[in-house]
Image (spheres, grey):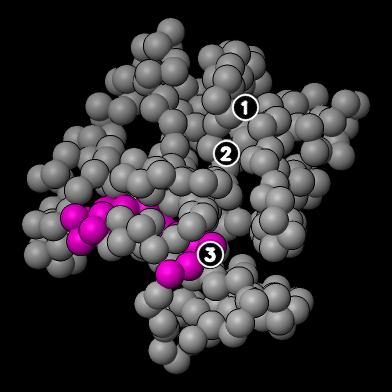
Amino acid sequence: MAKKGKLKVGIFSFTCCEGCQFTVLFLDNLMELFKKADFVYFDLINEKNRKETFDLAFVEGAITTKKEIKKLKIIRKKSKFLVAFGACACHGGIPSMQNFLEREQLGKYVYNQEMLKDSVKASGIGEHVKVDYYMYGCPIIKREFLEFFNSFIKGKPQKEFEGPVCDQCPLRGENCLLKKKLPCLGAVARGGCYAPCPQENIPCYLCRGPRTKADIPVEVALFKKFGLSEQEIYNKLEHFKNIDVGKVCKYVPKFEQIKKRKNK
C-alpha cells in the first residue's frame, strides 16, 4: 500500500531507450522526491511493482504493438493525471523510423519476425489515449521535470511552455547561432528545455518537435541560403520523425523525391 497522504506515482515504459526514466533516476535530489511521493510503479527502483491506481503517471516510449495499446489504455483508466514522457511518448520519436519504411523492407532488418505480426504504426501515446500533459525532449530535461513535479504536488500543475526554444536561449540576439550561419532549429522547435544545446554552441535539432505554428518553410529557405543541400535539410528535419517534411514543405519538390529514395 502507498503511504498515507503521499502521492501515488507510476513511471511506465514502452518502445524506447528508457533514457527519460534514467534522467529521473540520476536526479541529485531523488531521495527528496521519495519523501514527497510513493513511486508504486517504477521498474528501475522497485523489486516488485504494485499495480494499483495512480495520482500521477508518466509514460515514456512510442506505441508500436497492439499489446502496448491495450496496456496503455489500462494505465490511462487507472491514472488521474497522465504525462507523455519524452519525445517517443509525445510524437513517436526514433521508434517511428519504421513508419518511413515499407513493411516488406522493414522485415529485412527486424531480428524477430514474430514481432511484426503484432506491430502497428509507431506513434505517440496521444494517438490512443487522452494525455493531460506533454513533457517533450530526448531525453526529458531534469529542471522541467522537477518544476512540473513540485507544482503538481502543490495542486497547481504547470502549463506546457508554448514558445520556441529561442525564448529561453541566452544566445538570442547578437550571439544567435543563425547569425553564424549554423542550422539551428530553435525558432521552430517547442521550448521549455532552457536551450541546453545552443548554450554549448550546438544547433537545436528539434528533439522536442515543432511548435504548432512553426513556419518550417521559412526555416528551410534560410538553411538553403546557408548552403545546405535539400538532402541535408531533409535529414535535419526528419531526425526525430516528428514532422512530415514533404507535407509542410510542399514547395520543395526534391523532399518527396528524397523520401521515396529512402524508402527503396
Task: Say which quarter of the image contains residue 51.
Answer: bottom left
Q: Residue furthest right?
A: 174
Q: Name the residue beneath numbered marker 2.
A: 206
In magenta segment, residue 56: yes
* Residues tagged 2 and 3 counted as in contact (Cβ below 8 A): no
Instruction: Please report whichever mark, 1 or 2, sits nearer to the chain's N-terminal start.
Output: 1
Amino acid tagged 1: Val
The answer to whether any part of residue 205 appears in the image is: yes
- Image quarter (top left, top right, bottom left or bottom right) of the C terminus: top left
At 71% across and 51% down in the image, what residue appears?
156
Which of 133/111 is in front? 133
Apparent side of residue 168 relative to residue 207 in the rendered image (left or right): right
Mark 3: which amino acid? Answer: Asp
Q: Secondary structure at mark 1?
A: loop
Mark 3 closeness class: few <14, some 14–19, many ≥20 residues within 10 Å? some
Whether tag 1 and tag 2 are in contact, CB under 8 A, the answer is: yes
Q: Quadrant of residue 36?
A: bottom right
Compute the Cα span from label 2 to label 3: 31 Å
Q: Residue 103, how many percent across, how many down? A: 14, 44
Residue designated by label 3: 55
Residue with the mark numbered 1: 188
> For the point 66% across and 32% down, which residue is it?
162
Regarding mark 3 in the picture, which secondary structure is present there?
loop
The image quarter in which residue 152 lies: bottom right
Q: Earlier in the sequence, mark 2 or mark 3?
A: 3
Magenta-highlighted residues: 53-70
Residue 228 image point, x, y percent: 57, 24
Q: Nearer the viewer, mark 3 or mark 1?
A: 3
